[in-house]
Amino acid sequence: MKRFALLGPGTFSEEAARYLLDNGKESVELVHHRLISDVFLSTVNGETDYSIIPVENTIEGSVSLHLDWLVHEVNLPIQAEWVFPITMNLIGFKEELPLLPGDSLDEKLRGMTTVASHPTALAQCRQFLRAQMPQADLHETGTTAEGAHFVKDNGPGKGYAAVGTKSAARLHGLDILFEQIQDHNNNFTRFVLVGAEPVHLDKPNEQKTSILVTLPEDFPGALHQVLSAFAWRRINLIKIESRPTKKMLGSYYFYIDIEAPMDSVLLPAALAEIEALGCQVRVMGSYPSYTYIGS
């Protein structure tokens, strides 16, 4: 039995994990952690076989803390990725909302004092919270499930609510106050599976490779040369993002997602050309990218 570390329970990571692993060939065990550092370290220390990490969202972009852990803190190759739809819900105690006939949404939410959740989840619902609950303080938690736990622990009567999953509401005995409060309906999160061994799942997939490129300090136009190595070979770059190396101010690496596997004909030659320029290249993983098929 393979063991998978993730944030939870009652998180979007758990919902996404159950989707990915539903058709797995082996039985699995989900091991929940409160902090993303504990998720990574459980796999590094051999307590679990894989870690499930959310790394990017349609609305908020990259999750910088999680990418920094992948790059700077651990050496765990990416073995798979998948994109999962995220539906935000306002959850809490129904008795917090006045149930007078004819009340508007503003009036129903006028007594709420605090909304708790992970900062990324709060950011994805910024328009709803600003328009409908401007009086409420935002309380940041380590996961969306922790936000629900925070509301449960404080009990009804204080005007507390959380942003999170329906499973978190069920887990903590809370009610769904309002569904789909995210700013955009096309809200997806990209998850990666990291670990020492490849994983094989019965799902349609494409192949991708992720690399880090650090440019030489004394090479004007190096980034142009790097991109040219891919361009003339017609290798498609899906994403390129600069991040600080944490070594000195103004020093950056480039995180690049490539629409090709490492065993393709052209990609190894492109990476060799980039290294010949004096660039440092680190392959983060060459892996299947699974496509979400809704029910």
Image (cartoon, rainbow, N blue to C red):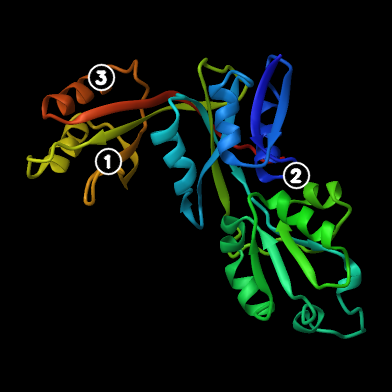
Residue at label 2? Answer: 10
- In screen coordinates, is 232 left or right of 105? left
Image position of 34 with respect to 192: above or below: below
- In screen coordinates, is 30 left or right of 97? left
Q: Amino acid at mark 3?
A: Pro
Q: Residues within 10 Å of mark 2 (few under 14, many from 20)?
A: many
Q: Residue at x 59, y 72 (%)?
A: 127
- Camera-nearest residue between 244 and 270: 244
Q: Residues within 10 Å of mark 1 (few under 14, many from 20)?
A: some
Q: Residue at x 41, y 25 (%)?
A: 285
Query: Mark 1 or mark 3, which is nearer the start of the sequence?
Result: 1
Q: Amino acid at mark 2?
A: Gly
**Distance from Cα at disc 3 to Cα at disc 1:** 19 Å
The disc label shown at residue 268, or none? 3
Q: Residues within 10 Å of mark 3 (few under 14, many from 20)?
A: few
Question: On the image, which quarter does residue 32 sit in?
Answer: top right
- Rendering coords of residue 108 (x, y %): 81, 79
Residue at label 1? Answer: 253
- In screen coordinates, is 222 left or right of 185? left
Query: Mark 2 or mark 1, which is nearer the start of the sequence?
Result: 2
Image position of 248 with respect to 5: above or below: below
- Rendering coords of residue 94 (x, y %): 89, 67
- Camera-nearest residue between 256 and 282: 282
